[in-house]
Amino acid sequence: MPDELAVPDEPTRPLDEGALRALVPRVLAALVRRGEDFDAAEDALQEALLDALRVWPANPPRDPRAWLATVATRRLVDVRRSEAARYRREEATRAQPHPSTTEEGDDTLFLLFCCCHPDLAPASQVALTLRAVGGLTTREIAAAFFVPEATMAQRISRAKRALAGRRLDRPGDLAVVLRVLYLVYTAGHAGRVDLAAEAIRLTRQLALATPEPEAHGLLALMLLNHARLPARLDDDGRIVTLDQQDRGRWDTREIAEGVRVLQSALAAGRPGRYQIQAAVAALHDDAPTAQETDWPQVLAWYDDLVALTDDPVRQDPAAVLGRAVAVGHVLGAAAGLRETDRLREVLGDRHRWHAVRAHLHELGGDPLAAAAAYAEAAHRATDVAERDHLVRRAARARAAGENSPFPGPVARG
Amino acid sequence: MPKYLILKHYRGGPTPHHPFPPMDQWAPQDVEAHFAFLRHVAELLEKNGEFVDAQALTPTQTWVRYGGPDAAPVTTDGPLPETSDLVAGWYLVDVDSYERAVEIAAYVSSEPGPGGEPLYEWMDVREVMSHTPADD
């Protein structure tokens, strides 16, 4: 065992897991750069991490990064020995890590490119990123996605096997990395692990490593949405829509940071989809009340967003749908509904399309049409909280549209 | 302890004891009372140490079979898509006895509907086979 452990009477201190996990990409990048196989190095580091979680609370090391590197290296050596390979035994004696000369940011970027390799499926990219860059354990990642630990372990090792033989020394596709990080963010915070917070942490690291404005735009988008999280559910776990939220519960510190990050990104003069979506989020965050939302500005940003693709209805229907809401607020509900008509073929079977139309019917003062559309949306929802929310909206819209609170004779029984 | 799956259905099963309209046509306060009752059931089962799992299913159903060599899978939405059984979700409970599973199912079935009256919804109770043969 490393000599750092030989401190017998040290009082137990709470383990700073965040600090521990921040070391993971740095140690792993150093191992891979030294010529270790990515798969084996990542496994070895994961085991070292589990050791650290067990051992450090009672025996904190003097140099946590060196401890992880040493233990991971020894694991690698043990693996090679057990494979009856003696030929690199000298590695055991040079288990002391050499101080890394590379920047922390380079390590993060390098590993994100490895984990978000375009040949991997999105679910594998996400899992591998959370483990190799985020430093989460397989058990934590499995819990976050509500699958058995063995299933997640298998997904991760298959992903790593798929990377074997790929060249990992060239810059990858930043657009894929951004998409993977956004996937992690939207996977949410329902499980024991707050994936939204984890995505922000990783994107923050990425933003330190690259000046690319879209990376900063993505960070801003996450911060500006995450700021509203405390107001998104009420005490009974019910969804509260943006226009009904208690804006006093929004995280003003996160909003301020998001706006700052967004402004510096936009200053580069190369707006992309994440910067534009962040600008929309900033306008919502900036409004003291829902009624004071600057809808013409929101619409202007959506115009830019749909202009990014040649055929937005097919290539980016979500942007066209978001724009339809803005059109409804600026030009009237009927104009908004006409915009959604263009999407019927592409999104007509999705709950969000019906929910947006329901909202526009409400805006236009037609609660019965809204009730019918909310019911259609509820029927197609794939999330329990959203389904319940849509059923509630349907019931409330119907009640508002009828003189009597109950429709048919069967209702009372 | 035996495990039981208590299934809720969108449709199918015995003739409804007490027909009721779809929930989006209930009074808003009745909808709230219904959801509150279901939250209470989940909390109660957890508190009793009987809860294993609860899931809800979307109402879209696809029947699939092998299409044969070099052929795509064959899919259909069923022989009588409007009237066949359609599972809506379940509670999986780990309980002392069959009687306790029936008791829980009946309690779920007392969930409030329009006007706060019980729904009397039919529940489908199924024992889950165990993986540990008896020792005798």
Image (cartoon, rainbow, N blue to C red):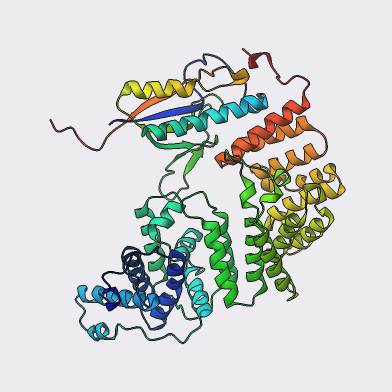
Does residue A409 lie above or below A95 as drawn? above
Residue A131, position in %: x, y? Answer: 43, 64
- Quadrant containing the N terminus of chain A in the rendered view: bottom left
- Quadrant containing the C terminus of chain A in the rendered view: top right
Foreground of the two, A251 or B99: A251
Task: Point out the residue furthest to the left here.
Answer: B136
**Residue at horizontal 45%, vertical 61%?**
A127
**Number of marks present in the image shown:** 0
Give the side of residue A118 with respect to residue A89, left or right: right
- Is there any visible trace of residue A271 in the rendered image? no
Foreground of the two, A65 or A27: A65
Give the side of residue A171 with respect to residue A267, left or right: left
Give the side of residue B116 with respect to residue A301, left or right: left
Residue A378, position in %: x, y? Answer: 63, 36
- Is there any visible trace of residue A77 in the rendered image? yes
Give the side of residue A301 with respect to residue A211, left or right: right
Residue A76, position in %: x, y? Answer: 29, 75
Does residue B41 lie above or below A146 as drawn? above
Residue A40 image-quadrant placement: bottom left
Task: Point out the residue furthest to the right here.
Answer: A331
Residue B136 image-quadrant placement: top left
Foreground of the two, A20 or A349: A20
Residue A81, position in %: x, y? Answer: 21, 76
